[in-house]
Image: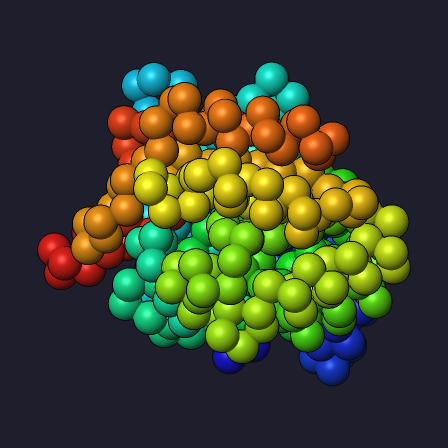
Amino acid sequence: MTEISSLNLEELKQQISELGLPAFRAKQIYEWLHKKNVDSFDKMTNIDKALRQKLSQQFSISVPEIERKLVSKIDGTQKYLFRFNDGECVESVLMRYKYGNSICVSTQVGCAMGCTFCASTKAGRVRNLTAGEILGQVYRAQTDTGERISHIVLMGIGEPLDNFENVVKFLEMVSDKDGLNIGQRNISLSTCGVVPNIYKLAELDMQITLSVSLHAPFDDMRTKMMPINKKYPIAELIKACRDYVKTTGRRISFEYSLIKGVNDSPECAKALCELLKGMLCHVNLIPINTIEQSSYRKSDRKSIEDFKKIIEDHKITATVRRKLGADINAACGQLRRESKQMGL
């Protein structure tokens, strides 16, 4: 059965044509799926019942079910555990800001990257998500809250550039004027550094923000934290980032999780500044979340502020990420692991 949620408008027109139906039907169906976010053909009320039945026999819709939902009593952040048709689960987090609602979505079921500070990768990667399944997380959260989502972050479970084709299709479809029409400048994609696909992404010249999870300025340190560094060491990654900026003219955001006694020293800060010197970039400092099966602990406030000052003294913009949903463990990966341990 074809997954209709992953078809762009032109592909849907082709499929509808092959069914012997007029082209305007494709536009109707596309709007129901991507503007009104329906999860059933039965809800497409301007399409006759016989056609709806035919569509349900030919196609499936990838909007997930809400398996669990946690709501922060501190700031209203909502964490979802979504279940897809095959029973696999991923997490998404809806965050409310003054500028609008932002959702952090997953791109894979599990993750193969093996970063030692991340809960998402502990059980490895199961499979990639389709474009429709990534879209479905946005749609389900939007219909659940009754509120429009205006910003998207691809930083949930999985490595987006390890699922390149589906992620790119998602980016094209979610920014489509005939769909949800979220501007690409309101979308951020986070990668741990799949270097060849950073070059491929640059050639597409999208208006998204690329966020690179760096987390260490030295190869030996980064390799212990992030096994991908064995394949694509820091020098290769930074060269790809500089080329990305040159090709796209877009500023890169470098994610740097501060871990007490590991990567939060003044020496690390100075080495980081040397790596990024002269690049159009921003450093996002992240006080790390404590997770089970890891000895890593969050840096203390003074170390964080000292680290930030060194970066700013080198004329590089730096911010400390505000932690939302602290009372519901809003960082992705933990709710999925918990549900699997409970046999849900």
Q: Residue at x 34, y 27 (%)?
A: 300
Q: Nearer the viewer, residue 55 or 193?
A: 193
Q: Nearer the viewer, residue 256 or 220?
A: 220
How many numbered marks does the figure carry?
0
Q: In the displayed structure, would residue 300 be above or below residue 15?
A: above
Q: State which quadrant residue 192 falls in.
A: bottom right
Can residue 136 be seen in this snapshot? no
Q: Residue at x 36, y 47 (%)?
A: 262
Q: Is residue 110 left or right of residue 231?
A: left
Q: Residue at x 87, y 59 (%)?
A: 247
x then y, percent, for residue 15: 71, 76
Q: In the displayed structure, would residue 160 be above or below residue 145?
A: below
Q: State which quadrant residue 299 falls in.
A: top left
Q: Residue at x 51, y 69 (%)?
A: 229
x then y, percent, for residue 82: 37, 52
Q: Nearer the viewer, residue 215 or 332?
A: 215
Q: State which quadrant residue 19 falls in.
A: bottom right
Check the picture and name the quadrant holding the C terminus: bottom left
x then y, percent, for residue 330: 36, 37
Q: Nearer the viewer, residue 214 or 314?
A: 314
Can residue 210 be seen in this snapshot? yes
x then y, percent, for residue 59: 55, 72
The residue positioned farthest toward the front in the image shown: 267
The residue positioned farthest toward the bottom in the image shown: 18
Q: In the displayed structure, would residue 324 be above or below residue 274?
A: above
Q: Is residue 50 left or right of residue 94?
A: right
